[in-house]
Image (cartoon, coloured by chain):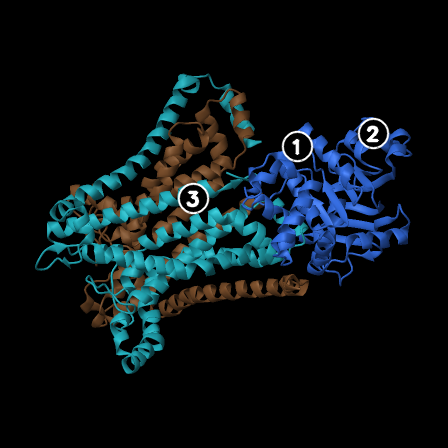
């Protein structure tokens, strides 16, 4: 009713220029300008990161910077990004491997098996957990998880290795608790809710008819999932996994708090390491030399490029593998 | 007879079905439990460190805490409010405008490109948004500032708001727009006074979700609003000078060598968690209400 | 050779030989015997009644058509015949559905076995889009662990021939099921349902999403299939029901208003509503 009254009020007014054509033009232009500003923002991100990192790229060469293994802001002023690049890739891949199957299991469970009320509860919890700030997970990691890992896993493994096969020690690394393994596990925990939500979304897209077709062939519940649900949702699930990988790559605070921050090779399983975001967080505020600052920006640019690729691949897969109306496109 | 051996009886198939359910339930529990444990730890450790001074005193130097003098994070809480509000003010028009363009002008040439760019920007690590704000605002201004922090968080929020605005407006049936246009209303008027009010809940939900996401981010603030152990002398210092914010302070406290500060870190954690969860639960409740209407 | 394969298949699928069962049913019920029968079948969604106290026989080697205006409950009724309502969250089914005299809603009966005896074809074609045509057809057999390539090939060819699709797809059995045209997809769905050799075939408006040409192919197909199966078809197309069916049930507002031989009902309906519907006065 109110809306109709409003519309009537408007109609009664004399029709001004703003109601004839000017208003629409202003409105559309404003929307376009605001839309363009998002595009501008994205491009300026690439431009700024490259521009600020140019000094480092020209000093060491683009590939030279990527392949350099020395990171010495103190004496030699040599900067190479390889340790951080590898640290990021290794932790993210490992985290995705750990997180992938449990996340899909939860997604399938809440979509296909759980009664509706339970599914809703778990789904809301998953979303809630995804909203926990990274620093909050980080503080738990520092004071609870890392010490616990050291006492219950790293020390026994380390002691066993010292006695039985000392050759393993360099691979295992320093069991102080803050290191690659700890950071990876926490990273996996943090991306699980994200992967789960995307899996759930992908499964939601599966039409009822596909499930019913499988039921009608006399499939059990699991067989319906295997035969109709997962194949249909595979594009979405895969894209979700890739986006989760992108999440893991950019995850900063918790990793910076737990990975131990060691800027040079060799990295080891339990020992400290570093990732691209963690080194930026750790050194940016204290960076004095302009080459140091520029190198950090250059790392930011590398991170940008990797994230860009990951996002575009995910978008491509979603489009390529998506199935519409029962037909594979 | 070989082929007979390959045959699965109904019993076997049901057993396999049961086994898979079991596996799914077990992995659900295995994942949910540690994640809930995190929340539990933060609450238990944080509650004990929360006291009156926490909300009324400044942090000051580490000596203050070690000598047992009252310290707190009042400047952090105020700073968070200022920076978050700035972020909201900056991001709202941009996100709304882009969302309106995407949903109300579906044939606009810019849209396919804008959608890809927006999703990509959303997928970019928050730390890069901090670096961007650093280069665009901190450098020209010559100082770390609350304003640059607001921009950094706005960069986090904009793509989320744009997407949620688009989907909230898309949920409104086209017939409502056509009804408005049919009585001779111009398009902008239809959008502003019929479509957007109808999509109100969806819009607010989107804002809350993006706000919850940005409010927990520390990475973009580390080199924009930077941090500050004291309240600024004048309120403009909140905008034009370095400002403390909860996530960034939590990080600094957690990696500091002082036991007293660790306790305050837990307390900051509980405040941040409660803040983010409140935003989040409100958003969820709104969506549910929306569904029933 | 064929006999050997057949025996092997009996052993493999665990199903007793179909023709034997049919003979048994014929002995029990006479040549035009009742294959399936519902007794006071009621389906409710929550508190809303979908269909109410339907009692209806389904005869051997006959096509039974269910007609009525949309929303009258004919699809609801059909889905009750192979326990598809088990999957709808708030649906409850009361009454009995007898297959060869046994109630399929008996608590000890596993719905999975029931659905293998009572096949179903849906309104929209539902090939599994990522599976090949071959795998689509034999999907039901692979479920029970049949891996024998020779046997699968034989069943696939037979089912595709029954569904009058074999000639069109024999050269591209490995291309995805989603790559076929709409009419072909629907015949593929039928072939898939036939491959598990059901005893009764349920068809839920199988031609409603197809063009006239594909529709008439499916109708021809139904004529062929009825030699071996009891068929129940839901259709909103009166001409179609008249062309393909032997018996017709008229549904209105969740109730079975009239049931009888199609010819008789179309020429001389007993109920006034039926007459009005058939003459196009409503619906």
Neighbours of disc 1 within 10 Å: few (<14), some (14-19), many (20+): many
Q: Secondary structure at mark 1?
A: loop
Dot 3 corresponds to which residue?
A317
Q: Nearer the viewer, residue A112 or C166?
A: C166
Neighbours of disc 2 within 10 Å: few (<14), some (14-19), many (20+): many
Q: Secondary structure at mark 3?
A: helix
Nearer the observer: mark 2 or 1; the answer is: 1
Residue located 15% across and 48% down the image: A294
First in residue order: circle 2 vs circle 1:
1
Q: Secondary structure at mark 2?
A: helix
Q: Is residue C122 left or right of residue B230?
A: right
Tell me, yes or no, if residue C72 can be seen here.
Answer: no
Apparent colour of chain C: blue
Disc 2 from disc 3: Cα separation: 51 Å
Report the chain holding disc 1. Answer: C
Q: Is B103 drawn above or below residue C76 in the view shown? A: above
Nearer the observer: mark 2 or 3; the answer is: 3
Residue A29 is marked as: none
- Horizontal and vertical percent position of residue A126: 47, 57
Q: Nearer the viewer, residue C4 or B131?
A: C4
Q: Nearer the viewer, residue C98 or C216?
A: C216
Dot 1 corresponds to which residue?
C210
Residue most toward the left?
A75
Residue B248 lies in what quarter of the image? Answer: bottom left
Report the chain holding disc 3. Answer: A
Tell me, yes or no, if residue A316 can be seen here.
Answer: yes
Q: Is residue A133 left or right of residue C169?
A: left
Q: Is A152 drawn above or below residue A291 in the view shown? A: below
Q: Are marks 1 and 3 in contact (CB under 8 Å)?
A: no
Apparent colour of chain B: brown
Dot 2 corresponds to which residue?
C278
């Amino acid at each position: 009713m109110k809306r109709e009254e409003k519309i009537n009020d408007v109609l009664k007014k004399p029709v001004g220029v703003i109601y004839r054509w000017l208003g629409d033009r202003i409105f559309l232009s404003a929307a376009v300008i605001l839309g363009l500003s998002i595009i501008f923002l994205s491009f300026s991100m690439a431009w700024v990161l490259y521009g600020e990192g140019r000094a480092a790229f020209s000093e060491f060469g683009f590939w030279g910077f990527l392949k350099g293994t020395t990171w010495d802001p103190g004496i030699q002023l040599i900067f190479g990004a390889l340790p951080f690049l590898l640290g990021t890739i290794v932790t993210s891949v490992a985290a995705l491997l750990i997180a992938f199957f449990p996340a899909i299991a939860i997604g399938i469970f809440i979509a296909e098996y759980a009664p509706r009320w339970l599914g809703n509860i778990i789904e809301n919890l998953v979303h809630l957990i995804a909203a926990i700030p990274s620093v909050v997970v980080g503080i738990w990691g520092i004071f609870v998880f890392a010490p616990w890992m050291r006492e219950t896993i790293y020390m026994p493994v380390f002691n066993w290795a010292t006695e039985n096969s000392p050759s393993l020690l360099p691979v295992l690394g320093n069991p102080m608790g803050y290191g690659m393994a700890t950071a990876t596990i926490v990273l996996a925990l943090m991306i699980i809710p994200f992967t789960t939500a995307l899996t759930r979304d992908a499964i939601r897209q599966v039409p009822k008819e596909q499930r019913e077709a499988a039921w009608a062939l006399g499939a059990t519940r699991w067989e319906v999932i295997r035969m109709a649900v997962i194949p249909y949702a595979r594009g979405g699930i895969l894209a979700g996994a890739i986006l989760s990988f992108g999440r893991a790559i950019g995850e900063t605070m918790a990793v910076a708090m737990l990975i131990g921050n060691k800027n040079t090779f060799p990295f080891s399983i339990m020992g400290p390491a570093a990732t691209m975001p963690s080194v930026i967080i750790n050194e940016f505020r204290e960076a004095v030399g302009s080459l140091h600052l520029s190198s950090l920006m250059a790392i930011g640019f590398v991170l940008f490029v990797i994230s860009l690729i990951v996002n575009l691949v995910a978008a491509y897969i979603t489009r390529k593998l998506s199935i519409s109306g029962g037909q594979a496109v | 007879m070989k082929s007979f051996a390959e045959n699965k009886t109904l019993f076997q198939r049901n057993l396999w079905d049961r086994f898979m359910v079991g596996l799914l339930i077990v992995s659900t529990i295995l994942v949910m439990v540690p994640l809930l444990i995190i929340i539990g730890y933060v609450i238990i450790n944080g509650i004990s460190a929360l006291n009156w001074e926490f909300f009324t005193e400044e942090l000051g130097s580490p000596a203050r805490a070690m000598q047992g003098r009252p310290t707190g994070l009042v400047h952090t809480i105020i700073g968070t409010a200022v920076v978050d509000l700035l972020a909201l003010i900056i991001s709202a028009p941009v996100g709304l405008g882009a969302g309106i363009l995407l949903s109300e002008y579906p044939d606009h040439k810019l849209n396919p490109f804008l959608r890809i760019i927006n999703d990509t920007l959303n997928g970019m690590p928050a730390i890069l948004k901090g670096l961007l704000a650093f280069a665009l605002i901190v450098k020209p201004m010559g100082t770390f500032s609350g304003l640059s922090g607001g921009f950094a968080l706005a960069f986090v929020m904009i793509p989320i708001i744009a997407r949620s605005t688009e989907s909230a407006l898309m949920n409104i049936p086209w017939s409502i727009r056509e009804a408005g246009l049919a009585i001779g209303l111009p398009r902008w008027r239809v959008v502003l006074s019929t479509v957007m009010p109808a999509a109100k809940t969806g819009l607010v939900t989107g804002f809350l979700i993006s706000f919850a996401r940005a409010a927990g981010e520390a990475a973009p603030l580390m080199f924009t609003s930077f941090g500050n152990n004291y309240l600024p002398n004048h309120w403009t210092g909140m905008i034009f000078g370095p400002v403390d914010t909860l996530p960034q302070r939590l990080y600094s406290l957690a990696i500091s060598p002082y036991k007293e500060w660790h306790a305050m870190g837990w307390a900051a954690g509980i405040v941040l968690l409660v803040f983010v969860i409140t935003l989040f639960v409100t958003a969820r409740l709104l969506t549910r209400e929306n569904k029933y209407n | 050779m064929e006999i050997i394969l057949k025996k092997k298949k009996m052993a493999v699928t665990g199903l007793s030989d179909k023709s034997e069962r049919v003979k048994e049913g014929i002995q029990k019920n006479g040549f035009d015997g009742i294959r399936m029968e519902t007794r006071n079948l009621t389906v409710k969604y929550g508190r809303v009644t979908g269909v109410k106290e339907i009692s209806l026989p389904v005869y051997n080697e006959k096509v039974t058509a269910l007609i009525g205006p949309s929303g009258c409950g004919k699809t609801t009724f059909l889905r009750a015949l192979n326990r598809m309502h088990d999957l709808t969250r708030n649906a409850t089914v009361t009454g009995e559905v007898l297959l060869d005299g046994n109630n399929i809603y008996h608590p000890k009966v596993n719905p999975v076995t029931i659905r293998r005896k009572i096949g179903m074809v849906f309104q929209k074609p539902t090939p599994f889009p990522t599976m090949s045509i071959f795998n689509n057809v034999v999907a039901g057999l692979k479920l029970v662990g049949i891996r024998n390539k020779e046997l699968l090939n034989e069943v696939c060819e037979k089912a595709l021939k029954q569904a009058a699709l074999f000639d069109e797809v024999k050269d591209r059995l490995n291309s995805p099921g989603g790559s076929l045209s709409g009419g072909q997809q629907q015949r593929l769905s039928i072939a898939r349902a036939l491959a598990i050799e059901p005893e009764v075939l349920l068809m839920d408006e199988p031609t409603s999403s197809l063009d006239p040409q594909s529709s008439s192919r499916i109708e021809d197909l139904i004529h062929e299939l009825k030699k071996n199966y009891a068929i129940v078809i839901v259709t909103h197309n009166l001409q179609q029901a008249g062309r393909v069916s032997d018996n017709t049930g008229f549904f209105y507002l969740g109730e079975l208003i009239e049931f009888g031989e199609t010819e008789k009902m179309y020429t001389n309906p007993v109920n006034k509503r039926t007459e009005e519907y058939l003459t196009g006065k409503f619906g």
